[in-house]
Amino acid sequence: MIERLVEFSIRKKETVILIAAIVCLIGLWNAFKLPIDAVPDVTNVQVTIVTSSPGLTPYEVEQFITYPIELELTGIPGATEIRSISRTGVSSVSIIFEDATDIWFARQLVNERLKIAVTQIPPEYGTPELAPVATALGDIYEFVLTSDRHSPTDIRSYMDWDLSKKLKSIPGVIEVNTLGGTLKQYQILIDPKKLAVHNLTVSEIIGDLKSANFNTGGGYVQKEEEQVVIRGEGQFEGIEELKRVAIRTYADGIPLLLGQIAKVETGPALRFGIATRGGKEVVAATVIMLLGENSREVVDRVRQGVAKLEKTLPPGMKLEPFYDRSEFINRALKTVFINLGEGALLVFFALVLTLGTAKGAALVAAAIPISMLVAVIFMRQFEVVGNLMSLGALDFGLLVDGSIVMLESVIGGFYAGRKNFAHPMNEEELRLATQAIIADRCKRVARAAAFSVAIIMLVYLPLMVLEGVEGRMFRPMAITVALALGSALVFSVTVFPASLAMAYRRPFIHKAHAWERIEHYYIRLLNWGWERKKEIVLFSVGLIVFSFTLGSFLGSEFLPRIDEGELEIDAKRLPSTAINHSRDLNLEIEKVLFQFSEISSVVCRVGRGESAAEPLGTEETSVMVKLKPKSEWVNADTREELMDRIKTKLESEIPSTYFSMSQPIENRINSLLTGSKADVVVKIYGDDLHTLKTQGDKITSVLSKVQGTGDLRVQKVLGLPMLQINTNYDNMARYGVSAAEILRTVEMMRVGANAGKIFEGMRRYDLVLRLDLEADEIREVKNIPVMTTSNNTVPLGQVADVEILDSGAAIYREGLKRRIFVEVNIRGRDLGGYIEEAKEKVKPIVDSLPEGYEVIWGGQFDNFVRARNRLILVVPVALLIIFLMLIAAFESVYYALGVFTVVPLATAGGILGLLIRGLPFSIPAAVGFIAVSGIAVLNGVVYASILKEEIASGKKIGDAVISAGILSLRPVLTTELIAAIGFLPMALSGMAGAEVQRPLATVVIAGVLIATALSRMVLPIVMETLLGWDSDRLVKKEQRRRKKENIYIQIDIGDDDLSQEFTKSASNAENRIETTPDHEIKKKQSKKKLR
């Protein structure tokens, strides 16, 4: 089948080249449409339900909102985990589904269950809503809006009602989250004493306002030939109309107006978050991308939209971006394209040097762009995003292997038949003879080339079955590599033979003087080694054992940290910290940060916005730090060093705050995956918050003494002061006060009672009633007057017990249980080693936990262990399949065993490479070991194939293993060299994003070098030993097969349909090696016979 495809491609070469050109154009078009991002989106399938209820404490939020939602969602099909956060005024419940679940189907399931859960939640406690369809990579653009001429309320209103709406209309944008400024409200400030004078209640006022604040329609009337619509308008249009609302009309006809008993004004709503920049409060906004969109295209559209909107801003307003995802994407793509470009150039020059023909090298190198363009077509079909992993892990050296094998075979054919070409021939005869050799030689090795590519594709099979984060990270890479290799295989048996037939109209005779010298030295090395077989084998085994022993001391981590170019600092204070105090501390943070010349801008965000997309408390600050290019750094050489210096400086100058250092995307991914932003998370489960805190403090104390502990904190679940007002029913009955009136009074202290909406054109604002109390009066809450049923007032302290308690700051739940996190960011140590030591030291605390409490370790460590265990299971299966394929191909278990001896040598080389460069074992390094195993097997196959032919030609096994080593030297060295060179730029790059590629490339290069150097000596010795166990039967079997082989090539030439049939024996002129009994190796030149 493959031979016929090669023959057809040569016969119809013009058609094949034309089809290839058309496919390339289609691939180029798809390349511009391919979704692009910096890193894979590893976010799980997740649906979040957010409920805003400003008047409730964490306990009430948990009891009345969070728990009913969790209970109803338990058992939902496909759900793997439910976790939640209950804070003051907000509930957030996240449901994580299996990876195969469609996000829209998951949202539909949640929405159906949520309708039932809503019936269990009192309406006044808020309405649960689904969060936007976005992921950890959804925050693509962030900016601040400032003005010296406008109030914070005006800036916020313009942001909410103008900018946000226009930005959300941009295709690909799902949401714009706003933080900072003040949210405008129409406020009616009630004086309880005046209500008592006029015998009024708050409920009466709210009823009067709601009954008047609406418009209605009365249908229409006909007036002659016209139809006139009837409309009644009663909506309040502003403060003056509100003041003139008649609350009551006395018998003498004098009305009691709202303005007489209350202040009516616009004011700020209760704030739960602020944003600062440059020492001033600003309004910050985050543009969120819809799941599945092309981030680069969406960011471009947002930037264009922002540029247009800037021209329409009111005078004095400025829009200043401070985070643009496209900058990181462009840096990552630059890394990918530079590495791939340098790799392609290095591969090309290496091909020219090894093959000795620039024309042939160019034809081979054409496999790189053509294979990539074809792969891109299928990447779009399979919805594979182009990023650092899917594109950056490609080795162009692997893509050209099949074409190299064919060109080597063709060059060998030209050289072997050089005497025949010395006879007089016209141009047509010369062309026909040249094409005949091209066809013959390509068909000879077509199966071998296909088999070799199949092996490389097969070794990537384990990555296809990874699950969780590691699956989402590496499965696209495996798909891309498989697509590129498959495309390269098709290229090598179709386009490449056709291009050879078009490019070479006469034979190319390569005088490989360099290779002859290399072969000469190799023969001398074989002479030397053949007398020391035992020592060489022992040395190789010793090296393998030594490397594997040292490998057990390698550190381990899930993924290297990618340099995003920005930092995100989380600052946490005591839960009781007021929002204004957090704002003041933000200014101190900015002052400290700007002492570092490496920092270009800083934006601080405290708490959460009204949408509660991220339920942070007012004691928490997220600091976005934009860094200058590394060429301008002065205080540090690396990102890690700079982070350590910044953290040390912040902690020394602002001791009351806990700081943790991370990066924007890294932070969001960790937060969405585990509910925490830390590298390592110790989860403690139980019922009582105080017990959870006690156990968390114990573990924190122990972990602080473990080497490598960087940022360390236990979640603050307690410490929020709560002013609790408990109704006293005895006194309430005595004074005639209802519980509803007391609770209404409590509500109106700060949040306010909602009385409707006020419209300003298309804008709408809340109308609320609040008590007209100053801050000092609120502290003296016992003296706040409460209405009685007899329209008198009584101090609140007379009918309720008022006390200050230490309340829960936040309640975290997972799997219907309360839990607390101990969070650790590791510095200067590998993840695996740290976890091992930490677990050992924490074990006594875990063993002494109260009944019903448990500890589970999570974070990146969880991902690493799951990926490692899966690879430990799947990689041996893949290698077993390859082993069975080798047995089927060579019809002998001995050949398969011999080929597999190269794999431990390559693995040992990879381990040494990691040790020399000081890199820990990680999942990218594991991918490198998988790749280098395939390359090692591939080159073992080349040697074994030639050895089989040598035995079939009549040579003894002892002679054949040596001659096969010499004959395979050039193709093996060429393919190994090209494979290593293709990864060289990735191994040496220091650009953004290269951190992920470096371990993979290091393993492959080191593994290839060690395996090539040792296998040239070890493989002949091992093969001689293995085949010697059954030498007579193997020799006879190969010789019988050889006698049956004749190769026929039919070539159709142009319109004349001329044909020539070449029948060649399998013993065409080759370089043969004869080994004398005393192992003196002599090279002989045999003559080629053409039948």
Image: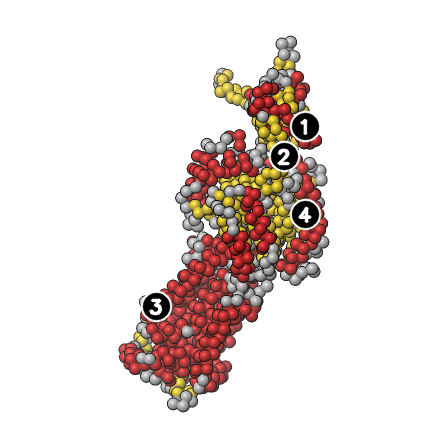
Contact flag, marks 2 and 4 (Cβ < 8 Å): no
Q: Given this view, does label 4 or label 3 mark the residue nearer the observer?
A: 4
Q: The residue tagged with tag 1: helix, strand or loop?
A: loop
Q: Which residue is mark 2?
A: 804
Q: CA distance from mark 2 to mark 3?
A: 74 Å
Q: From the image, which quarter does the C terminus lie in?
A: bottom left
Q: CA distance from mark 2 to mark 4?
A: 23 Å
State which tag comes first along the sequence, 2 or 4: 4
Q: CA distance from mark 1 to mark 4?
A: 32 Å
State which tag comes first along the sequence, 1 or 4: 4
Q: Which residue is mark 4?
A: 656
Q: Which residue is mark 3?
A: 884
Q: Residue at x 44, y 68 (%)?
A: 933
Q: The residue tagged with tag 2: helix, strand or loop?
A: strand
State which tag comes first along the sequence, 2 or 1: 1
Q: How is the image coloured?
A: secondary structure
Percent x, y of residue 335: 56, 61
Front in this rendered view, residue 587 or 497: 587
Q: Which residue is mark 1?
A: 773
Q: CA distance from mark 1 to mark 3?
A: 84 Å
Q: In the displayed image of the protein, which residue is found farthest to the top? A: 252
